[in-house]
Image (tube, rainbow, N blue to C red):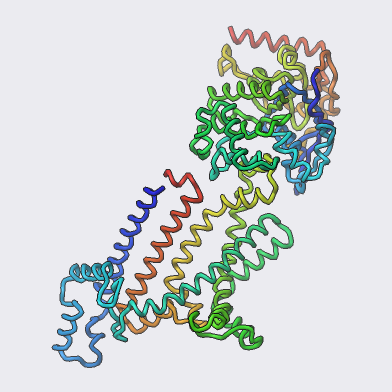
Amino acid sequence: MALYIVRRVMWAVLVVLIVLLLTFAVFYLLPNGDPALRFAGKSPTPESLALIRQRLGLDQPWYHQYGVFVKNFVTGDDYGWPGLGFSFTSNVSVLSEVQERAPRTLLLIMGAATIWLTVGVSIGVLSAVRRQSVADRAAMGFVLFGISAPVFWLGLMALFVFWKKLHLTGGTGYVPISESVSGFVSHMILPWCVLALLFAAIYARMTRNSLLETLGEDYIRTARAKGLSERTVILRHALRASLAPIVTMFGMDIALLVGGAIITESVFNIQGLGWLAIDSTLNQDLPTVVGVVMVGAVAVVFMNLIVDIGYAFLDPRVRYA
Amino acid sequence: MSETLLDVRDLTVAFPTHEGEVRAVSNLSYTLHRGETLGIVGESGSGKSVSSLALMGLLNRDRANVSGEALFQGRDLLSLPASAMRDIRGKDLAMIFQDPFACLHPMYRVGDQIAEAVTAHAKVSKSKATERAVELLDAVGIPRAKDRARDYPHQFSGGMRQRAMIAMALVNNPSVLIADEPTTALDVTVQAQILELIERVKREFDIGVILITHDLGVVAETANTVLVMYAGRPMEVGPARDVFSAPQHPYTWGLLQSMPTIDRRLDNLVAIEGSPPSLLRIPPGCPFNPRCPYSFAPCTVELPELRQLAGGHLDRCHLPAERKRDAWKDVLAEHLGAAR
């Protein structure tokens, strides 16, 4: 088991390095405009451009730039660890920008994930067990709604009903938890639910299908033949075996959302990583874009690692493969 | 005869479908005694497995209509409420299945899965239950049972998994063990070991065994009583010795002729023509009549009764006894000729 984890971690590091290379290549090597030109502001003199190129290291060959980039990322730069450079537009370090934005996105995702896992999986179990009952049909109706409803429409409707009309929740914007816990919750509850709805719907359907498939397995018949209660058969035997695809999906979903729950963040004006990604892309602020991409990439790799390890815990057969 | 464990009367299982009712089992009756092995033989779809699943209460009650009686310790298993049936299942009535590769949960340790059968029926600690599981694994011939109990099913061979299934079935000292094609998925050498094991535990645990199989060879080796099923009906029932030495039903003859033996080469095997009928449209009269070479007038009209012969031998066929004697003689002569 320990060896398995070590092997997975080493793979993860390699993948991050490759992603770093690709990110670097895409944003610094492809003809995408001269970064120095953008940094220098309006009508720069050739001398100041040369000076900027030298300061940013743009006069060096690409492999040297990549080396410095990797070195800064791994060992940190003047602004801390991991080194991501500084923004061309705001002259603030990308790291501090990411550090300010990331908690918002992470808290948004954590809250939503908690909701969609509990709601989605329990609806899925219920409708699989009561297959073709009224409850099952209602659940599948909910699923269809959740999958079809666009997030921006849903978000605006939720704001209109619960904030404007009923005054039950806070409005848009972000209130840090350190400032006011109740303010934080009342501002986050709508984004949590709206973001969770789509995933809850998908997870409900996935859980239902996976569970129905498992319930047809021979070892479920064995469990019943032992005289176990139906509850134990479903929760201990069937659900355990049905979890694998859900765990995989969950890891990928979390990772992708870290890269930016862009629509939800925009609708509710939570200026998280998604907002940062859009803002920096529109401003062609390359170091910030690279920074956000790196955070997303590391999240994907990290969640993959977690999923792989979780898999091994769930299914003993994986450990020896 | 020794104590009667199970008395099945007119067991009928039907599945309503869009196209009509599928009659998987029709009026099946038999008794099982302590220390007896009852072999139920038939082709796929003859109702042999379904009848046992019905006894165990493992058929979905919403989708299967089960009628008849199955008396066990004075209670009718078929009319017990689900919770009472659950108490009996795995405790007094135990069952093992065809494919041991698929029947154990891949994510739990073998010992834990057996221990779970203990704790399902008795208030004992987990460690006590595990001790009992190890004891049973040892009894069914798993070497180093204490260590192997901590293994996962994929670390077991097919034969060992079937042994583990048997250990699981016996862990609560049941009275009846139903073995549904227990050797079909196993290597031939392992098959013999598992059959021997079932015979041994039958004696040691003093239980009754229902052995379901399509393989007459398996029945010949182990069963005391043979029940031949076709299209959901018992066609011939009797002591194994009588059924093998003087088989009465043309279907049984067909089964015997299609069985490979050491002195009979494959090209001499005689297959039964045609295939079993759809259970949606069972032919009128004797269900075997479209495939029966001896079929005559009444066979297509009237279902023969199960006739009582000497020595508890039952037969469901219109053919008069003399004709049967002659026909079976011809079959034997042909067989002996082919062997030479």
Which residue is depicted at the point 24% across and 81% down? A35
Is residue A261 among the parts visible in the rendering?
Answer: yes
Which residue is depicted at the point 73% across and 34% down? B92
Q: Quarter-wise, where is residue B71 in the image? A: top right
Residue furthest out toward the bottom = A43
- Residue B308 spot, x, y in % from top left: 85, 18
- Residue B323 spot, x, y in % from top left: 80, 12
Q: Quarter-wise, where is residue B13 in the image? A: top right
Q: How many marks?
A: 0
Quick one: B201 or B219, which is closer to the camera? B201
Q: Is residue A81 above or below residue B202?
A: below
Q: Horizontal placement of A156 versus A50: left or right? A: right
Q: Quarter-wise, where is residue B210 in the image? A: top right
Which residue is depicted at the point 57% across and 52% down? A242
Which residue is depicted at the point 77% across and 48% down? B62
- Identify the image quadrant of the C terminus of chain A: top left
Quick one: B235 or B3, which is closer to the camera? B3
Is residue A174 among the parts visible in the rendering?
Answer: no
Q: Horizontal placement of B146 versus A32: left or right? A: right
Residue furthest out toward the left = A47
Quick one: B205 or B213, which is closer to the camera? B205
- Residue B77 spot, x, y in % from top left: 80, 37
Q: Is residue B88 above or below residue B3?
A: below
Quick one: B109 or A156, which is closer to the camera? B109
- Residue B260 spot, x, y in % from top left: 59, 18
